[in-house]
Amino acid sequence: MIPTMIGITLLLFVVMRLAPGDPATLAVGTVGMGAEGAAMQAESNMEDAITKFRKKYKLDEPLLVQYGYWIGSVARLDFGNEFFRPNVKVRDELWRRMQVTVPLSLVSVILSYLIALPIGILTAVKRGSVADKTATLSVFLLYSLPNFWAGLMLILIFGKTGLGWLPVLGLHDKDAASFTTFRYVMDVVHHAILPVAVLTYGGLAYLSRQMRGGMLEVIRQDYIRTARAKGLSERVVVYKHALRNSLIPVVTLFAGILPILIGGSVIVETIFTIPGMGLYAFEGLVQRDYNVVMGTVTASAFMTLVGFLISDVTYALVDPRIAYD
Amino acid sequence: MENSLLSVRHLQKFFPVRKGVFRKVVAQVKAVDDVSFDIAPSETLGLVGESGCGKTTVGRSLLRLIEPTSGSVTFDGQDVLEAGGAQLRAMRRNMQIIFQDPYASLNPRMSVADIIGEGLKVHGIIRKRKEMEERVEQLLEKVKLDPVYINRYPHEFSGGQRQRIGIARALSLDPKFIVCDEAVSALDVSIQAQIINLLVGLREELGLAFLFVAHDLSVVEHISHRVAVMYLGKIVELAPTRELFTNPKHPYTQSLLSAVPRANPGAARNRTVLKGDVPSPIAPPPGCPFHTRCPVVMPHCKTEVPPLKKSGPGHTYTCHLDG
């Protein structure tokens, strides 16, 4: 896992640094903007500031040396400080952002599994029925909707411009600090409905299609016929024999979900201005804040690898044919 | 037939062919078209024919693993096709099936004990796990497998061993009748012999009746009391085994038998090689279904359906020729 991790981060690091845009000019530019007439500052002064900035963050060193510094501090679980708020540690900010993203993603993942699995099973068992066709078609439509569009539509419909039922910005009311616990929780739930809906529907559609496919695959196997021939009831045949076998591919899909769970969705968090990991990555990217981008991306990459590991382990747990020595 | 265990009358199974957006039924595949036969207790009926002639469909229809289109199946005095839910499941205690592919027919996620013992539990014959395991061990011994394998999973066995597990599974409910759906055709010849001898032994020991579906005539000859020959969804000839093999009446049976390899390659052989392919069961030829390939076809074969004729005790065939 460690060599893979080094490979991934090295690649990301190099790509990030080679991408156009320069944090030093951006940073000095922003600082200069503050004062009246600062744009007129002497050019040498500006150059000085840029060189200083570069020196401070070791941006003047060769790429590989920079990577060496970076990976060295990451090994000590230090992702450096933000370029634009130099007293904020990226690690601490990551931790804060995760506390926003993880509950949100967790709810959406649990919801999508809870809704998708029954849909998948039912449509597979009643294949060809009207219910199957309706469900399959609507799931397909959902799957085809891009989430930035769906998010904006939901905002238009339920936000102030439309029905005005639901808040569309952030996760808290502006007075949330003064709320009682109950009201605080209700407020968060209220704010979370739309983002969770957008986060959920795509995965739901994908999962239910996978579940249906897996179930159909298993249901025409000979051993399902064997189970029927034993005189088992249809319930036992479907839930014990067919379902358990078709869960194997669905369980392993969890590997792909874990990084999203931690990394959040850049699009959804940006649309709804939710201060989570996704928005953090987006901000970092816009400002060319290498430390922020590398921090968020490394967290996602790490979780992807953990996801693979977990799905390999669960694979071995749920399927007796697979054993790891 | 008096005192028959299983009696099949005019069994038909048509599979609809659907096309287009609205899945309209455009044609019917006549997989089984008007099949009738009886099986007596402890009797083995061989069912042979080319691929796609409907043998497997007949076997599965008997157990309602496929819902037949029409006809009647009476097992032990009970109407199988009318039975619903609980009654059908109870009936399945007495009618079992062994499948062709021993790799696909065992649930990969269940241990041998669960595969064999599940039926016992479901039918309430045995409640305690320990009792079940004892019974499963007995069954494993019966099919000549070592009882220590009880907690292993199907993928740890060879094809022959898996088929033995399949047989033990079928035996677990003490059935009176077992459909062997190409039960040995997926196995090596040496293993085939072992499994067939096992089945013959079990038949003697337990008084089982078999419907032995196969395409290998020598295997069928060895195990069957009577043999039915199917062509395009119909039984064209049915006779006691020796009678069928020595005195075949239907030209199709004759050509099938002429294709069986003989132990003495030098012996003179009168080989009848059929030309062409089996016609599509979607549109079977009018008249006699075999007339498109029959070596002795006559003009009226193409228009008139041949009658069912008798030739000696228990020997029937459908052909315009008089043997």
Image (spheres, coloured by chain):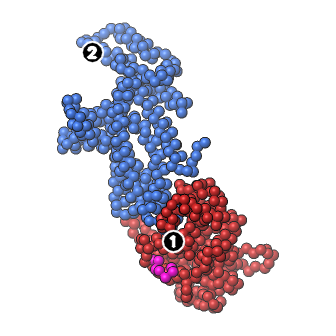
For residue A294, the mark is: none
Position of the C terminus of chain B, as image quadrant, is: bottom right
Which color is chain B depicted in? red
Residue A180: image x %, image y %?
A: 21, 33
Range of residues picked out in magenta: B75-81
Which residue is at a point 60% across and 79% down the rendered structure image? B42
At label 1, which amino acid type do we have? Answer: Arg
Percent of width and height locating residue B134: 58, 62
Residue at 47% across / 72% down in the picture?
B90
Q: What residue is pinned by disc 1?
A: B93
Chain coloured blue here:
A
Q: Which of B223 and A4 lies nearest the eye of the viewer?
A: B223
Task: Tell me which corner region of the image, top left, top right, bottom left or bottom right, holds residue B46.
Answer: bottom right
**Structural crowding at the residue carrying mark 1, measured as other residues with C-alpha within 10 Å and reported as few (<14), some (14–19) or many (≥20):** many
Question: Crowdedness of circle 2 by 10 Å Cα count: few (<14), some, many (20+)?
Answer: few
Q: Is residue A51 magenta?
A: no
Residue B90 vertical position relative to residue A70 in the rendered view, above or below? below
Give the image quarter of residue B225: bottom right
Amino acid on which the number 2 mark rests in the picture = Gly
Q: Name which residue lies at 41% across and 12% down.
A: A51
Left or right of A18? Residue A33 is left
> Residue A34 has which mark?
2
- Would residue B210 appear left or right of A220 to someone viewing this image? right
Classify the position of the N terminus of chain B by image quarter.
Answer: bottom right
